[in-house]
Image: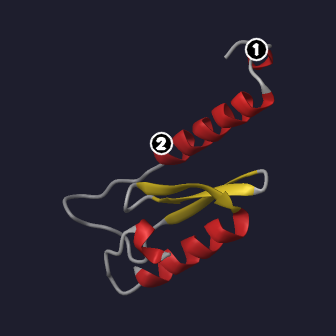
């Protein structure tokens, strides 16, 4: 984006763009294994943006979308615990 490009957008539109870029950046850091191999516990990251955060599971290759920070952190902890013993529980199944 060029300097001043964000000036063309409303505050809400700018925030949405920053959120989308943040989630995309987190997914670009996904790590990949050989055929059908995952980490146990799953590699889960919480990406904060203001008072919201997105929980990203690099093994499930999924995310929660933006949630309140505490909810995102709790979901990440729960997902790590559920996948500690080798279970392949999906990120969305932890709520």
Q: Please give the name of the residue rendered at 72% of the width and 36% of the height, measured from the top-left corner.
A: 15
In the picture, the disc for residue 28 is 2
Horizontal arrangement in the rendering, residue 22 relative to residue 34 (left or right): right
The percent position of residue 92, horizontal first and vertical second, equals 43, 67
Quadrant of residue 33 in the image?
bottom left
Q: Secondary structure at mark 1?
A: helix
Residue furthest left in the image = 35
Can residue 47 be seen here? The reply is no
Q: How many marks?
A: 2
In the picture, the disc for residue 8 is 1
Q: Please give the name of the residue rendered at 56% of the width and 71% of the height, measured from the top-left corner.
A: 76
The percent position of residue 37, horizontal first and vertical second, equals 26, 66
Looking at the picture, tell me which residue is in the foreground, 38 or 60: 60
The percent position of residue 59, horizontal first and vertical second, equals 38, 62
Dot in front, 2 or 1: 1
Q: Please give the name of the residue rendered at 40% of the width and 53% of the height, measured from the top-left corner.
A: 31
Give the vertical position of 51 relative to 79 (above or below): above
Looking at the picture, tell me which residue is in the foreground, 19 or 44: 19
């Amino acid at each position: 984006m060029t300097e001043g490009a964000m000036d063309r957008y409303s505050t809400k539109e700018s925030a949405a763009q920053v959120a989308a870029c943040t989630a995309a950046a987190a997914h670009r850091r996904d790590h990949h294994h050989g055929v059908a191999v995952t980490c146990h516990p799953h590699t889960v990251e919480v990406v904060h943006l203001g008072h919201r955060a997105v929980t990203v599971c690099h093994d499930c290759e999924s995310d929660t979308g933006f949630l309140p920070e505490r909810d995102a952190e709790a979901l990440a902890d729960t997902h790590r615990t559920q996948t500690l013993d080798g279970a392949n529980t999906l990120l969305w199944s932890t709520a």
